Amino acid sequence: MTSLAETGQVTPETLFYDAGSEQWSAIKSNAELQTLLFPEKTKLKLRPQESFSALNTAPAAAAPITVDDMLAAAEGRTAETKDKSDPEIAMARAAKIGMWSAIVILLVSAAGEVLPAVDVIMAFTPAKLLAQPLVLLGLLDALLALLLMLGMVTLYPVVRFRAALGLGFIGFLFWAHGQSLPILLVAAASTGLFCCTLFVSVTAVIVVGLVGLAGAGALTYLLLTT
């Protein structure tokens, strides 16, 4: 009868033969039998929701994170990640600053070397150009600056050679005339130009760039006013 009760073929009103009373009786009249065949089912109850505080929940007043914020964090430009910046990003930034510093130094130097002899350039006489070596050096500086603007950083060895050539050649010209201040300015400009193509530290590149620019600017002013 248990299997019949489980399949629903027997109900509490179903009659069964009671051997003790020798008569047919309903199952519900026998409490023990009814409990055996139809046990009371346990009711499932939902527990009340317990309050908890999540560890990774953002505060209600927190600003949403944007793509710019994520990029700034990756580059170490936020307060939380400034000590974890990628060294390659810093080196790339230093290289870019160095390139533009070298371009400016070359252009300023070219101005001081070419402008005093602009009439020679306009005449475009080979003999007169050869007699003005600073003009040729100025044209080289302008060409190198233009190529660096186009991103040809593979010319850095040529730029370093130009820096050494400028220090030796122009320095010798001023030394031959007994001028010491221009020699110091040439040394500053050439050293700054040379180091701008070598250093990969932002601070170092800025320092040598300013030194080179100051030397080139002062030398150009001296050449244009004397």
Image (cartoon, rainbow, N blue to C red):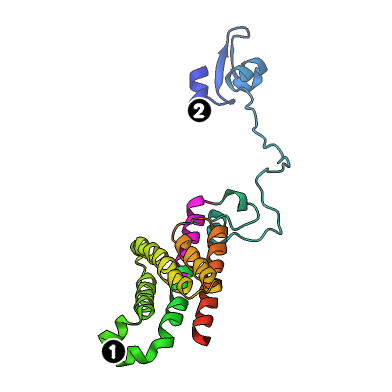
Residue 121 lies, with reference to residue 9, above or below; the image says: below
Q: Nearer the viewer, residue 30 or 58?
A: 58
Q: Mark 1 points at which residue?
A: 124
Residue at which label 2 appears: 8
In the image, taking residue 122 as reference, residue 199 lies left or right, namely right
Query: Is 93 part of what is drawn in magenta?
Result: yes
Residue beneath the point at 53% across and 61% down: 205
Could you classify mark 2 by the number of other residues whose Cα lies within 10 Å: few (under 14), some (14-19), or many (20 or more)? few
The residue lying toward the viewer, choosing from 69 and 2, is 69
Whole-percent x and y of residue 15?
A: 56, 20
Residue 191 can be seen, yes or no: yes
Position of residue 54 in the picture relative to residue 186 (left or right): right
Residue 103: in sight, yes or no? no
Tell me which corner region of the image, top left, top right, bottom left or bottom right, holds residue 211: bottom right
| Mark 2–mark 1 distance (CA, rounded to whole Å) | 116 Å
Q: Nearer the viewer, residue 177 or 88?
A: 177
Counting residues from the N terminus, which is met first, the one under dot 2 or under dot 1? 2
Q: Please count the marks in the image.
A: 2
Residue 200 location in percent, x, y? 49, 55
Residue 38 included in the magenta stretch of the image: no
Type of amino acid under label 1? Phe
Residue at disc 1, secondary structure: loop
> Could you say which disc has been placed on residue 48 in the image?
none
Query: Disc 2 residue type?
Result: Gly
Which residue extends farthest top? 20
Q: Is mark 2 on a helix, strand or loop?
A: loop
Residue 126: image quadrant is bottom left
Task: Name the residue at the left extreme.
Answer: 126
Left or right: 152, with 222 as reference point: left
Read off the magenta span. 86-100
